[in-house]
Structure formats: C-alpha cells, structure tokens
Image (cartoon, rainbow, N blue to C red):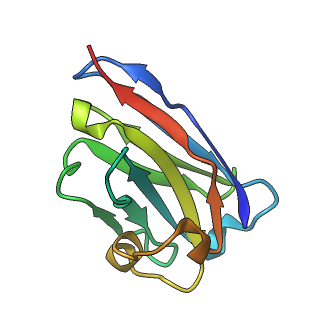
Amino acid sequence: QVHLVESGGGLVQPGGSLRLSCAAPGLNLGIYSIGWFRQAPGKEREGVSCITVSDGSTYYAESVKGRFTISRDNAKKMAYLQMNNLKPEDTAVYYCVLEHWIQAAQALCTTSGPLERFDYWGQGTQVTVSS
C-alpha cells in the first residue's frame, strides 16, 4: 500500500547534486529493508540502491556506483538517497519502497514486478538532469 512520501527531486544541471528523502510516517522503519527505484520514460523500472535492516549492507546499480549513497534513520522514520555528479541518464521518477521479507540488498533491488508487490511504496519524485 502507498504510504511513503518521497521528496527532494527537481531540475538540476549535469554534475549537480540532489538529496532525495523518503518519509515513512507511522511505520517502524527498523523492520524493513529499503529500496530506491527509478523509472524513465520508455524504460523498465530499475533498482538503484537498497539497504538492509539487519546489518545495513547496501547495493548499488553499476550505473550509480560511486555517485549515489543510500542511508536510513530509523528513529526519524526517514530514508535518503544522496545523488552526486548527476548525469542526464539519471533523469527518471524515483520511488522508495519498504520490504520486510527481502532482507538482502541486491535481492531487493533486482526484484522485478510492480511496486505494489512490496510492503509499502511512494508516489515518486521527479528528477530531471538537464542543462
């Protein structure tokens, strides 16, 4: 069910940075793995970065390694995606999801299917990288 609220998207020039936030009001974030996915027009949804709850292990898609950083603050019920050195190909709608039953970061990020298959998801935030 939709329960998460993403924010922080916008228009940025190539090489710029954005920090996406994902709010999970009323949820115990401490029992969920968190994933950030993105979908560009005409392309399949892509798992960008995921983080587990058990040991905080992370996964990054090859396309964003070294540029994006995922983090979580369970006490504040927030997740974040710091995006640096943005490129035009990063343009997409970014979604965060919570999942209790998939506790491996790579497994979460490579899970196919609609967002509705996860425990919680958001409406997404648009990121546009353009000069």
**Residue at left 26%, top 13%?**
131
Left or right: 129 in relation to 31: left
Residue 57 image position (x, y, % from top left):
36, 70
Farthest-out residue, right: 26
Residue 26 image position (x, y, % from top left):
82, 59
**Residue at left 56%, top 41%?**
21
Q: Toward the viewer: 32 or 61? A: 61
Left or right: 59 in relation to 62: right
Left or right: 40 in relation to 98: left
Left or right: 22 in relation to 84: right
**Residue at left 69%, top 56%?**
75
Corner quadrant of residue 109: bottom left
Q: How many marks?
A: 0
Residue 89 image position (x, y, % from top left):
23, 38
Is residue 87 in view from this perspective? Answer: no
Q: Toward the viewer: 77 or 117? A: 117
**Looking at the image, residue 30 lies above or below residue 44:** below
Farthest-out residue, top: 131
Residue 37 image position (x, y, % from top left):
43, 56
**Residue at left 54%, top 39%?**
125
Farthest-out residue, bottom: 101
Is residue 108 in view from this perspective? Answer: yes
Corner quadrant of residue 15: top left
